[in-house]
Image: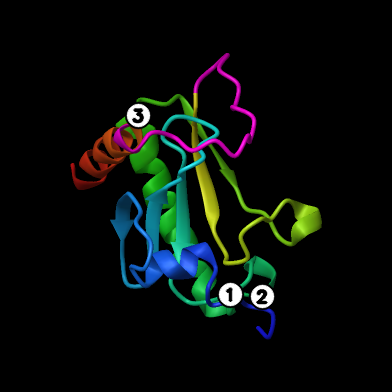
Amino acid sequence: MADYDPDNVFAKILRDEMPSQKVYEDDATIAIMDVMPRADGHVLVIPKAPSRNVLEMDAADLGPLFAAVQKVALGVKAGLGAEGVTIQQFNETAGGQVVFHTHVHILPRWTDIPLKPHTGQMEKPEVLAAHAERIRAALEG
């Protein structure tokens, strides 16, 4: 993990140095709203253990990460009334990875509604908060 940057945006969020709209947390992971969503309700599940990507993760951390992904995906689907979900995970620059701390994207999907392009435009905080509340309610319910 020589190339892991402890000052990446997700490491800062994990240390509460940057704000986020958290929807779920357990001993091994947190799930937050993506501030540049490609779908309404786009969530990121982030392991607390530092790793650049899945290729470099400790194998013992994979199970807890993907257990959280499944749980959060069910909450996203129920909370947003989605017909399905797309789950994505990118590794290295050539694979589409931008932030070099392992994370998994959960995107709620509806028939005939395409994903938004990744423009780098940030969503309004009140929209993220509303989506987060619906997802948290589904996870608690």
Residue that extends furthest to the top in the rendered view of this protein = 112
Q: What is the crowding at mark 1: few (fewer than 14 residues within 10 Å), some, or many (at least 20)?
A: many
The residue under label 1 is 51
The residue under label 2 is 56
* Upstream in sequence: badge 3 or badge 2: 2
**Along the line of sight, which residue is nearer the eye, 36 or 62?**
36
* Helix, strand or loop under label 3: helix
* Upstream in sequence: badge 2 or badge 1: 1
Q: What is the crowding at mark 3: few (fewer than 14 residues within 10 Å), some, or many (at least 20)?
A: some
The residue under label 3 is 80
At x 39% / y 68%, what residue is drawn? 14
The reply to whether the magenta stretch includes residue 123 is yes
At x 41% / y 58%, what residue is drawn? 68
Looking at the rendered structure, the kind of residue marked 1 is Ser
129 vs 121, left or right, is left
Image marks 2 and 1: residues in contact by CB distance under 8 Å: yes
Residue 27 in the image: above or below residue 79 = below
At x 43% / y 60%, what residue is drawn? 67
* Helix, strand or loop under label 2: helix
The segment highlighted magenta reads 110-126
